[in-house]
Image: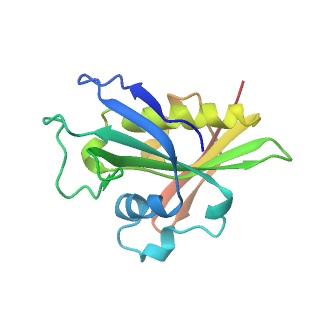
Amino acid sequence: MEPRHTITSLAPQRLPITVRPISAAETYALRHTVLWPNKPLSYVQLPDDEAGQHFGAFIDTSNEGYGKDKDDNTIKDNGGSAELVSIISLFIDEECGEARFRKFATAPAWQGKGVGSALLAYTIEAAATKGATSIWCDARQSALGFYQRFGMSGEGEVFFKGEVPYLRMSRALP
């Protein structure tokens, strides 16, 4: 298992964010709540989850005043005060050198505070470290600007998953 990394976000409060590997099962609650709350839980479980690498961003909430919503479905880290507030799953095709991240979700109370940015930066670095030469995702159209800040560009035409518009976004890795 990879070591934990503590990252200080660029948000005004400079949150102490710890990113570490987690199991696929640990991603399901946030995937469901944030991405597809009106679908059954099984909808957010991927057939290839066991082949992926899953990362979680944890916030130490022992210091009051971070604006935690009591209904944000965060998970306590080992009974301590660190809560799982953002998740992402990474899949690397070693034959072609492509990495894909999927099911990236941040609890609503923590969106816009640098947590997702820290987790995506960590994931991009992890993909490059594992030898991937490019990374891509199917991005919700509402989040294209977020991915563009990470050097990702749109490819192809907009498509739909249910009623939600998506665009494939990608970038080369160093």
Q: How far across and down, in percent of the image, does residue 111 sit? A: 31, 41
Left or right: 32 with respect to 13? right
- Above or below for 47 versus 6: below
Q: Position of residue 153 (x, y in %)?
A: 61, 35
Q: Position of residue 62 (x, y in %)?
A: 20, 38
Residue 171 vs residue 19, the one in the foreground: 19
Q: 61 or 128: nearer the eye?
A: 61
Residue drawn 31% across and 39% down?
59
Quarter that holds the N terminus: top right
Q: Up-down: is 9 above or below 146?
A: above
Q: Residue furthest front?
A: 79
The coloring applied to the image is rainbow
**Residue 139 showing in the rendered view:** no
Query: In which quadrant of the rendered view does residue 38 lie?
Result: bottom left
Residue visible at 13% across and 36% down?
Answer: 64
Is 159 situated left or right of 85 in this image?
right
Residue plotted at (37% across, 36% down) = 115
Q: Residue furthest left?
A: 65
Task: Locate the C terminus by quadrant.
Answer: top right
Give the x, y percent position of residue 8: 37, 24
Of residues 157 and 19, the one nearer the viewer is 19
Residue 28 in sight in this render? yes
Q: How many marks?
A: 0
Q: In the visual, does 160 lie left or right of 168?
A: left
| 84 relative to 91 in the view: left or right | left
Residue located at (41% from left, 42% from top): 57
